[in-house]
Amino acid sequence: MTILFDLIIKHFLSNYKIQTGSSCLKDFPSNLDEEGVPQNEVKRIASLIVQYSVRTFSPHFHNQLYAGTDIYGLAGAWLTEALNTSQYTYEVAPVFTLLEREIIKRSLELVGYPALPEADGLLAPGGSMSNMYGIVLARYKRFPEIKTKGMSVVPPLAIFTSEDGHYSMTKGAHWLGIGTDNVYKIRVNELGQMDVDDLKEKIHQARNKGCEPFFVNATAGSTVLAAFDPIDKIADVCEEHDIWLHVDVSLRAISRRLLSDQNFTEIHYFLLFFMARVAWEVRYCCRISIATPDALKFWLMWKARGTAGLRKSVDIAMDCANYFYEQIKDRPDFRLVLPEYEGSNICFWYIPPSMQGQEENEEWKNKLNRIAPTIKEKLIKVGSLMIGYTPLPSKNMPNFFRMVVSCQPPPSHSSMDFVINNIVEHGCKL
Amino acid sequence: MTILFDLIIKHFLSNYKIQTGSSCLKDFPSNLDEEGVPQNEVKRIASLIVQYSVRTFSPHFHNQLYAGTDIYGLAGAWLTEALNTSQYTYEVAPVFTLLEREIIKRSLELVGYPALPEADGLLAPGGSMSNMYGIVLARYKRFPEIKTKGMSVVPPLAIFTSEDGHYSMTKGAHWLGIGTDNVYKIRVNELGQMDVDDLKEKIHQARNKGCEPFFVNATAGSTVLAAFDPIDKIADVCEEHDIWLHVDVSLRAISRRLLSDQNFTEIHYFLLFFMARVAWEVRYCCRISIATPDALKFWLMWKARGTAGLRKSVDIAMDCANYFYEQIKDRPDFRLVLPEYEGSNICFWYIPPSMQGQEENEEWKNKLNRIAPTIKEKLIKVGSLMIGYTPLPSKNMPNFFRMVVSCQPPPSHSSMDFVINNIVEHGCKL
């Protein structure tokens, strides 16, 4: 174990490239055999695993969906693994249970909910599960008989989510027996936010088809554009129609002051780290937990950094995202996908000099569609930077870069410049 | 981090009591505050967490549901946490993806399934999820239209499971919109195995009520008694009625030669460690994954120990379970719950001398019901041994001990004697 520890430390301090390229993997001894391997072969393999893995903790890793490792979070995770306990009973996990309650208690305060036990919470291991918890709770509140009788005793149910909402809504509708056809995708405006008039219209349509609208999913930080749905207005519609409002707080949706000043930011930040969303509506809990994530890594980070420390990290990330935005917004070789940004996700195209000042017809768009993938491929080969791209077919938008500014490792203006310079360096001759 | 590492090593080598008692926890600084805490306070807290946690890696920890830490598994887990990647794309997790495929490939071989891609598998983070995967797959195969249209377009569906089956069947029926009333609990015989005649009868009953039987859950190692349902006979019934057969391979169900000689044992063993069951039926996969557990800890243990090493661990555990059984079966102060055992779970009552040779009426049973809890409480206070107990209300059985013999740390005849001696020591005066 000492050797493993040295390896990991070396890994953290190393200047390895972000990715070494998967072609090396053909020599990786992945085969599992009748006989085991000796200690020094385990050592060599552990070293190879480190070498061939993507360095997600690099300051230049900006690929989608997560940030780097927090050192306290890692310490908590290691302790959790070594102690090898489970949170299903207080008996075997007294400390862990205590810490989980503290996280829920403080989180309820942060979002302005009533205290335990009037309100409650659950830690979920990921977005799909967490959105499913929300649907199960809403369904139980509206039709408690479904728990015992199943869905054949109620009319078809309808779910509403924006066309840019997370795919787990559809997956959840399949799992939970609601049906993907009964997920109504609501139009978004040019900023990627749910169109409330279209929501009203679709509720009407669903009713006309004999469906029972029971669940609206509002997104606070959509998957691609990090857009915030107009939650206040959606809440009015939900109240009028007696529909459960679920807010899907996405992983990169940091720093929006949504519920009360300064408060919601921290929640977002935590989510950013742990890929865990909290089903706030669990106050109507009906014994639905299907997995028990461990609270310690989350708790230890919060304890060590304090709410103030976490808030500061978010402020730094937001300042850097804003700096990045300011640097590219007036350049001829960069073009923003949205005119403004509320989160720390900046989406943009790089337009090489050879493509500037031309008619932007289909051929031009097809060419632009290849620019981000080509630059990304070069960057990965060099290993200097990792950044995601995606098209937005619903808006007929060719591939654009999605720059994710996260809190760990702490970004800086110079790490933002590094991204811009690297893209220009590998794209300017295209 | 070095300090943390020292702590954990100390923890592994320590002779701490198994549990220190939760009363100490009142001083634990669980509060999360505006300000963080300095490094040496983090150190002190980490130390307290270790001190107050149950030592699940002790050779005398026999509480329900899991075994001790495997050192290679732990190394894999630490690496996984440090590398902080996710298996959702090959791009960010090339090595992990490769290892996951190898685990699935080899596991398919072990259970005698066709090779990839004709058959396929999924790693699941726990039993509830894994049983739900099975139900979703079975439902999709029988009524693919449920995916898009929901369950309102089909008749009520019926699930069959033994009365000793895992509670996640009921939970899954709630989640998936089937309804807990549509879970038919099949009687078990005196060995805790599903009664196939009652299964046939209940299928008939469900049809008469207008339900569509689509899913039978056979249990290979039931939660309390580690009983094995008669899978061959159940399979015949399922074939006749065109019902999907799902086998729930429970965590402690090691060493039964179920499908082909020597093969099934390993699978059980892996499950024992990782609380992950594999949805074998995923060959009919319909893009249902809702969480991505990490494969590395599983893979590294298998790689280091080899299939032969794992098989040997199972043999040692089974030998010790058998030794334990032999030691207590003829003693007047021990009484077995079942006359024979197929797994490594031995259930028994301790009958103190003061209760022997008496009429076993209700009053006697009520007294016996308090024996196991009283002994357990004493053992926890002393910190020498941790062992679970449970009643079996369906059979009107008072609380009995459930001795779980697991593979890690390797058990021995002397660690078995230790359990017997400790129970006698703390129970003989009752």
Image (spheres, coloured by chain):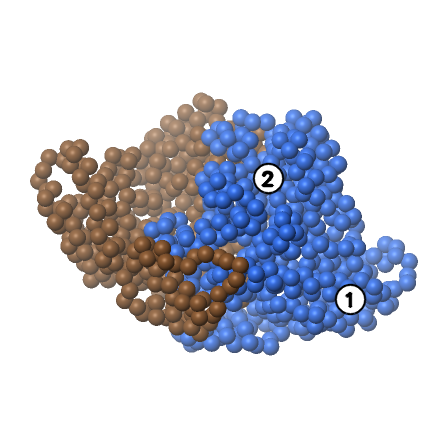
Chain colours: A brown, B blue
| Point 34% across, 67% down: residue | A12
Kind of residue at disc 1: Gln
Q: Is mark 1 on a helix, strand or loop?
A: helix
| Point 77% across, 55% down: residue | B340
Residue B109 is labelled as none
Work out whether residue A277 can be spotted.
Answer: yes
Do the dots labelled 2 and 1 sit on one chain? yes
In the displayed structure image, the side of residue A54 where residue A147 appears, left or right = right
Residue lying farthest to the left in this orientation? A357
Q: How crowded is mark 1: few (under 14 residues within 10 Å), some or many (20 or more)?
A: some
In this view of the protein, which residue sits in the foreground, A74 or B322? Answer: B322
In the displayed structure image, the side of residue A143 where residue B401 appears, left or right = right
In this view of the protein, which residue sits in the foreground, A90 or B138? Answer: B138
Q: Position of residue B112 (x, y in %)?
A: 57, 46
Q: Position of residue B240 (x, y in %)?
A: 66, 31
Disc 2 designates what residue? B173
Q: Where is residue B229 in the image (x, y as percent from the top left)?
A: 69, 45
Work out whether residue A302 can be spotted.
Answer: no
In this view of the protein, which residue sits in the foreground, A116 or A146? Answer: A146
Q: What element carries label 2?
A: helix
**Does A350 appear above or below A51?**
above
Kind of residue at disc 2: Ala
Q: Do the residues labelled 2 and 1 touch (CB within 8 Å)?
A: no
- Badge nearest the viewer, 2 or 1: 1
Quadrant in which the C terminus of chain B appears: bottom right
In the displayed structure image, the side of residue A61 where residue A123 appears, left or right = right
Residue B327 is labelled as 1
| Point 45% across, 64% down: residue | B78
